[in-house]
Image (cartoon, rainbow, N blue to C red):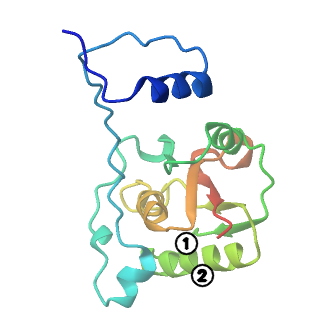
Amino acid sequence: MPRKNKLSPEDIELFRREVGPVNPMRATNRATLIKKPRPPRRQPSLDQDRDAGRGPAFDTFAPLDGAADEELSFVRPGVQHAQFRKLRKGRRAIRSELDLHGLTAAQAREELIAFLRESQARGERCVRIIHGKGYNSPDRRPVLKTKLNIWLRQCDEVLAFCSAPLHDGGTGAAYVLLSTR
């Protein structure tokens, strides 16, 4: 069925002069649905949890299945793959270190929060946290490692973290990539 133009012949001529030669597009009767991924649900940060006076929900936890030799790995959306690969391979300069050996979970949490704040305030981009493998815990399971895995995910300043390479502590330590704010 031919379409009726509501434009005058002069307007059509003017339009063709201004636009120039064109190739008609192939008509399709299908609409393409582009689904955007949902942003991940944000958990309250450690500070929000403490400031709200709520007991931390992550104090009840299940130990890691692989125990001491299980690797930690976490990357926030938006972190470049190349940056995380450099972190995993130990190719980022470590600016400071926190050793949590011998601390209770409550002490370790407070030390971690203070350490991350200070490191970020100094503009440090990559730090190492030594959590141990849990060999001295009653059931020989990594208590601090399990908690650290949860705590770091809740810190907005943490962009990514992973277990360190063997020469730098292996699965008993973690590299942490911090945001620059």
Q: How far apart in space, not on screen, are marks 2 and 1 (Cα)? A: 17 Å
Identify the residue position indicated by label 1 in the image.
Answer: 102
**Nearer to me, 144 or 83:** 83
**Nearer to me, 113 or 85:** 85
Q: Earlier in the sequence, mark 2 or mark 1?
A: 1
Task: Look at label 2 and name its amino acid.
Answer: Ala
| Label 1 residue SS | loop
At horizontal 51% and vertical 81% (from top left) the residue drawn is 110
Tell me if 157 is positioned left or right of 118 in this view.
left
Relative to 87, residue 100 above or below = below
At horizontal 56% and vertical 62% (from top left) the residue drawn is 158
Pointer 2: residues within 10 angstroms few (<14), some, or many (20+)? few
Front tag of 2 and 1? 2
Instruction: Give residue 169's mark.
Output: none
Tell me if 169 is positioned left or right of 39 in this view.
right
Identify the residue position indicated by label 2 in the image.
Answer: 114
